[in-house]
Image (spheres, helix red, strand yellow):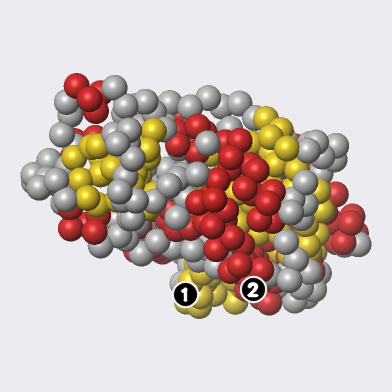
Amino acid sequence: MTAPTTPVIRLKPKANARAIRHGFPWVYDNELVVDRRTRKIAPGAIALLEDGERRPLGLVAVNPNSRITARMLDRDPAARIDRDWLVARLARAQEMRARLYPEPFYRLVHAEADGLPGVVIDRFGDIAVLQPNAAWAERLLPELAAALAEVTGVTTVLKNGSGRARGLEGLDGDNAVLLGAAPAAPVPVRMNGATYMADLTGGQKTGLFFDQRPNHGFAAALCREAEVLDVFSHVGGFALAALAGGAASALSVDGSAAALALAEGGAAAAGVAPRFATRRGDAFEVMAALAEEGRRFDVVICDPPAFAPSKPALEKGLRAYERVARLAAPLVAEGGYLGLCSCSHAADLTKFRGASVRGIGRAGRQAQLIHTGFAGPDHPLLPQLAESGYLKALFFRL
């Protein structure tokens, strides 16, 4: 039985307990009975969740300060959420990645989809970068770091406190070294034959986006002997993969000088620097300028940040994606290829595809959709939670 000290929270009678039983992992603030005892539950505490008839549904992590007030941890009401429990969850995640990837560079934990709600962990060899984006994970941070080292053998664990999700949970934005020592220089990461330089202490998010790995690989196959433009390039994602795939040249466009410097470092490390160039500036302005210069490319790929990070931002975000497509399409040579990406979970595939096609049409181009890509298998999708399947990549022939 659950220990007597474990607090209990209960769904309102009309709340959808069936969705929870069928795998939905969240309980919102307006679905819970609120009384004097529930108001006293500290953020990050573990509680027993009951349905409206007081039948147990499982153990949840509670944060009264969040719109997502409870996150399902374990459907066994008698489970103990301790270091051994964390070791078991991490080992399960590690086993799958070890089967998929010959080298330890991947997303090790993808939050709810790996049974660790709100927790993101990316692995870079002997270093792991941890984003505890939920109050329960912040509260158990020492145990989580120790379990991570036990399961994987990493010698360094870094906490990355950036990201919108931590703010929504009422958490700080601080970074920290939880184990070992922070790397003194960017870490080289090999993917799809390319070398990427990951800044694990000062870069975006955890330092590198592993999610695009399969889409980089698909794009590289289109880029043999091609002139390639990579817009919103970050550290050279598509450009460096294209060069590894035999592209004649690649131009990376990004607003961040630091990101472009890392891209140049990756090109040098892979021996492709003579075929690589960068252009710093606002992506929309650079695309307009390239069109005025009469530039054309065999392959153009745009991988912008999340223009629609939430439902309230959806319409504005879709207009931005349409604008990206409208500016990028004229830069594609006749018979060339255009890749358009979205990492906005609020813009589902249908809406994003519609915005992209409208933009291509407004540019006066005809398109064939030849491939739709998603995140790699180290970013699994929890079928009951649409938000865990955020990445879309569309490839067109114009």
x and y percent of residue 310 in the render? 37, 42
Determine whether 379 is above or below 116 in the image: below
Q: Residue at x 82, y 53 (%)?
A: 188
In the figure, is residue 224 to the left or right of 96? right
Q: Which mark is residue 46?
A: none
First in residue order: circle 2 vs circle 1? 2
Q: Is residue 12 visible?
A: yes
Q: Is residue 362 left or right of residue 302?
A: left
Residue 280, image x, y percentages? 72, 41
At a point 52% along the width and 56% down the height, the residue shown is 89
Residue at x-position 67% and y-position 30%? 176
Does residue 51 sit above or below 92 in this rendering?
above
In front of the other: label 2 or label 1? 2
Determine the image quadrant of residue 251. bottom right
Q: Nearer the viewer, residue 151 or 318?
A: 151
**Amino acid type shown at disc 1:** Leu
Label 1 packing within 10 angstroms: few (<14), some (14-19), many (20+): some
Where's residue 298, x and y in %? 67, 69
In the image, what residue occupies the spot 61% across and 67% down? Answer: 95
Could one spot residue 323 in this view of the protein? Answer: no
Task: Count up the numbered dots.
Answer: 2
Residue 328, position as x, y percentages in the image = 56, 57
Work out how far the residue at label 2 is from the one at label 1, CA to CA, in angstroms: 32 Å
Note whether 195 is above or below 178 in the view shown.
below
Q: Nearer the viewer, residue 265 or 180?
A: 180
Q: Which residue is label 2 attached to? A: 99
Amino acid carrying mark 2 in the image? Arg
Callout 2: SS: helix
Q: In the displayed structure, does residue 146 sit left or right of residue 305?
A: right
Give the residue at mark 1.
Answer: 369
Count residues near mark 2 (Cα–Cα under 10 Å), then give few for <14, some for 14-19, many for 20+: few
